[in-house]
Amino acid sequence: MPFGITPEIIANLTVILVVFFALQISAAVLVYMERKVAAFVQQRYGPYLVGPRGALQPLADIIKLMFKEELRPKAADKLLFYVAPVLSAVAAFAAFAVVPFGADTTFFGLLDHPIHLAAADVNVGLLIIFAITSMGVYGIVLAGWSSNSKYSLLGGLRSSAQMISYELSYGLSFAAVIMLAGSLSLQQIVGQQAGYWWLFDAVPIPKWFIFVQPLGFLIFLTAGVAETNRAPFDFPEAEQELVAGYHTEYSSMSFALFFLAEYVNMVTVSAVATDLFLGGWHLPFLPEWLGWLAFLIKVFALLFFYIWMRWTLPRYRYDQLMEFGWKWLLPAAVINLLVTAGIVAYWG
Amino acid sequence: MADMDALLFWVLGAGAIVASLLVIGQRNPMYSVLLLIVSFAALSGLYVLLGAPFVAAIQIIIYAGAIMVLFLFVVMLLNVPTEDPPTGYHARLLGGAGPRRFGAVLSAGLVLELAWALRRLQGAPMPDDAAAVPSSVHAIGVKLFRDYAFAFEATSVLILVAMVGAIVLARKEKS
């Protein structure tokens, strides 16, 4: 082919585009899911007018957001006010780049060499995710500060304190899995979760890390919810106290970007949890080439859990959140890490 | 690919230097903090070019992700107004002849040190093969916990002591 374009390059570009659009579509699906689940929990119908069973409601939401007026407070810092939501969204999308979502494939023999089903293949993938997620906090903090509004500032401050606190437990729960797998590459971590353990030589258990790291999984999930600012840890935007927190002053597409970032972050946390603890694209009795489907099912099961939790649990109080993070979650993560290290050192 | 690497090196290097210079030039401390983050990001890109993705990720996680968030936090909490030229006592303290001379001596020392380091580096052999450079996580771990284990542990104790000291200083006495 001309210009040195090989089928591999085309395939990789396609994967990147698919990831990008799938994330946007999943955000729309999540909005619908959130509304429907919320309605179910509260014994309402939820959206039902736009499209069959209200399925086109997210589209209507997007159109509404696009046509709204873009407002900016007079005293806001002009540059940072517009940079903040972009930063938020970019960090959210970029973090997903290193998440693998399927087994290596040649697309049924179309390619000579199999390619990874991930937008980018990095051998320190987990660290990259951690690094980019920690960049996401800047979007929120800057939004809070640049709006020049008290509610926004308080929301931004709370969020940064919360994210710093929970990032530690988040990272430590990663570390236990890294020790077990002996690798920082998500590809390899998922690869090690293929196959079965045989309980009493009779009962097969999939080799998922959740079965050896149940505490680690719980810590990861809890810290993940706090990282993405979702209920019951949604202090940055606790509406009873802070109107809408860091995005109080935002409207139209700037607001939509924050909204998008929140949902994409949820997808990323769920996808990483799937790769680390739930065996990625491995599912018993499912052929390898359908792996992406298994991955999708697991991710959406976790996302459902996210939404379920939001509409079931009341919000913590802020000091309780901090106490829980530092006095319970972090020690639990450290103990989990030490025990894992001991076991790996003894048997591994 | 070599051209691409060279181009990226110049872009990232220039980005790091320009951002660092702008950090000093800002009146608004908020922008200074953000420009410092840009500078760190460019540095991290340089590490990737050098084939050290681990160092690059750590650079972002620790400096841009943890330390600068604390900086930002402090700037926001104190709500530091834009910096005005100092007047009165502070003007005399910082702008007086004595401090200026002292500052000049310090910067001259820094420039000399940099020149010395660069000259020394010129003679030093650059490891050509990637295997000689501890770039992989495994190699870094072995180096850190075998060859430099004592220094590593001593540093962590030092940091712990500093942390305890900070807490003691910041704690409110109950009386």
Image (cartoon, coloured by chain):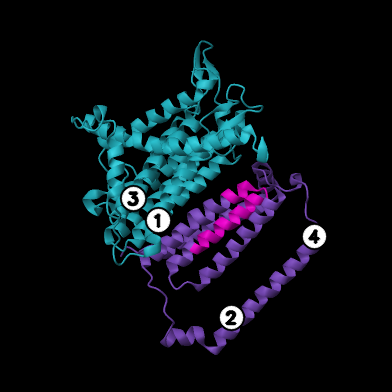
B120 over A302 or under it: above or below: below
**Which chain wears purple?**
B
Residue bearing the label numbered 3: A253
Q: Is residue B46 magenta?
A: yes
Labels 3, 1: front one: 3
Measured in 3D between alpha carbons, the distance from the residue under mark 3 to the one under mark 1, in whole angstroms, is: 12 Å
Residue labelled with disc 2 = B103
Label 1: few (<14), some or many (≥20) within 10 Å? Answer: many
Check disc 1 and give the amino acid type.
Answer: Ala
Check disc 4 and report its element: helix, strand or loop: loop
Q: Chain of mark 2?
A: B
* Badge 3 element: helix
Q: Residue sitting at 63 percent across and 52 percent down?
A: B47
Three-letter amino acid code at the position of disc 3: Met
- Residue count near mark 3 (Cα–Cα under 10 Å), binned few <14, some 14–19, many ≥20: some
Left or right: A285 as drawn, with respect to A28:
right
**In this figure, which residue is indicated by the disc labeled 4?**
B124
- Residue A299: give x, y in percent of width and height: 42, 30
Residue A63 lies in magenta, yes or no? Answer: no
Front residue of this view, candidates B93 and A34:
A34
Q: Colour of chain A?
A: cyan
4 vs 1, front mark: 1
Chain of residue at mark 1: A
The amino acid on which the numbered mark 2 sits, given as a three-letter code, is Gly
Q: Which residue has dot 1 on it? A: A84
Q: Which residues are magenta?
A: B35-57
Secondary structure mostly taken by the magenta-highlighted segment of the chain: helix
